[in-house]
Amino acid sequence: MLDAHYSHRQIAKALKVSRNTIAKIACGNIENLCQSSYQSIWDPFSDEMLDGIRTGKTGKEIYIELAKRYKTIGKMTSFYKYIAQLAEDAGLKLERYHHRPIPLPDGTTIPQDFDCIKRNGVLQYLWNGLEISQSHLDYLYRKYPIIPVLRKRILEFREIFRWKNPYLLFLFIDNCKEGDNVKLSRFADGLNQDLEAVLNAVVSDLSNGFVEGINNKIKMVKRVMYGRCKLPLLKAKLIGRRWDEVTSITDFCG
C-alpha cells in the first residue's frame, strides 16, 4: 500500500491500526520492530548468577550475595523464577540445599548422603495424616514440640463438626488457651469473639456457601450495562428471563 502511494491515514483506516504504527513500519526495520523489547530486572545480574550456579551455590546464597552488593534488587519470588529458568537454559543444575556431600576416603562423594523431609510433607502429615517415617517423626517431635500439639488440635477440631457437638467446641477453645502457643490462643480468642456464628456452623446443616460470589456477579453485570440499560434488563439477566418473554425493547434500554 505504501508502494501504491496510499497515505498513512488511509492505510491505518484500512488496517484498523494507528498512524504511528504505520509510520514506524514505513521508516524502520520490520524484523526489529517485531522483536520483544522486554527486559527483566535480573538480566544485568545473569552472569553473576551463572557463576554462582557453577560453583554449587544455592539460590538463596546467590540472592543474599546480590542483595549485599546491590541495594536495589527485586523480590525473592521473581528471583527464584528467573534463576531457575536461567539454569535450565544454560543446562546447569541449581542446588536446592546448602548441604555439601562429605568426600569418601577414595575421593568420591555420594550424590545424596542425607535424609530430609520437605515442609509440604510436614503439612500433609498435620492436615491429612500422611504417613512419614518413624525417624522423621521422632526428629520433628524432638526439634519442634508444637507439631504433636497441632496434630492433636486439628483432630479435635474435625471431631467438632463430625459429631456436631457444641460442648466439644468449648473444650477445644479451652485446650487452645491452656497451651503456651500464642497463635493457638489468638485463634481461640477469634472463635470466642464470633461464638454465636461458630455455634450455628457446628449444629446447623444450613450454609450460605451458595451465595458466595453473587455480589461480585451482580456488580459485574451492572457495570457492563452502566449508562445503556435500565433495571428491567438487569433483573432479566440475573433471574435468567428468556428474550422471547420480553414484551417491548423499550422496557429495557434507556
Image (cartoon, rainbow, N blue to C red):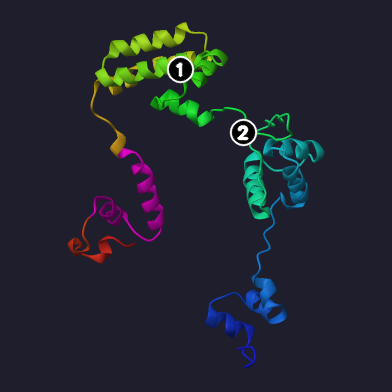
First of labels 2, 1 by sequence position: 2
Between residue 102 and residue 247, name the one nearer to us: 102
Between residue 83 and residue 11, name the one nearer to us: 83
In the rendered structure, the answer to whether residue 119 lies left or right of residue 240 reads right
> Where does label 1 land, which residue?
150
Dividing the image into 4 quarters, which one contains the C terminus?
A: bottom left
Q: Looking at numbered disc 2 in the image, what kind of residue is underneath it?
A: Gln
In the rendered structure, the answer to whether residue 213 lies left or right of residue 77 reads left
> x and y percent of residue 235 in the render?
27, 52
Query: What residue is rendered at 39% in x and 51% in y?
Result: 220
Q: Indicate yes or no whether the magenta region holds residue 155.
A: no
> Where does label 2 land, which residue?
112
- Does dot 1 land on a helix, a strand or a loop? helix
Between residue 64 and residue 226, name the one nearer to us: 64
> x and y percent of residue 174 in the render?
40, 8
Judge whether residue 65 can be spotted in this image. Answer: yes
Compared with residue 67, is residue 145 higher up or lower down, i.e. above or below?
above
Dividing the image into 4 quarters, which one contains the N terminus?
A: bottom right
> x and y percent of residue 96 in the render?
63, 37
Where does the magenta region start and end? 211-240
Q: Residue furthest top?
A: 178
Between residue 168 and residue 26, name the one nearer to us: 168
In the rendered structure, the answer to whether residue 240 lies left or right of residue 82 reads left
Q: Residue furthest right?
A: 69
Q: CA distance from mark 2 to mark 1?
A: 31 Å
Q: Looking at numbered disc 1 in the image, what kind of residue is underneath it?
A: Leu
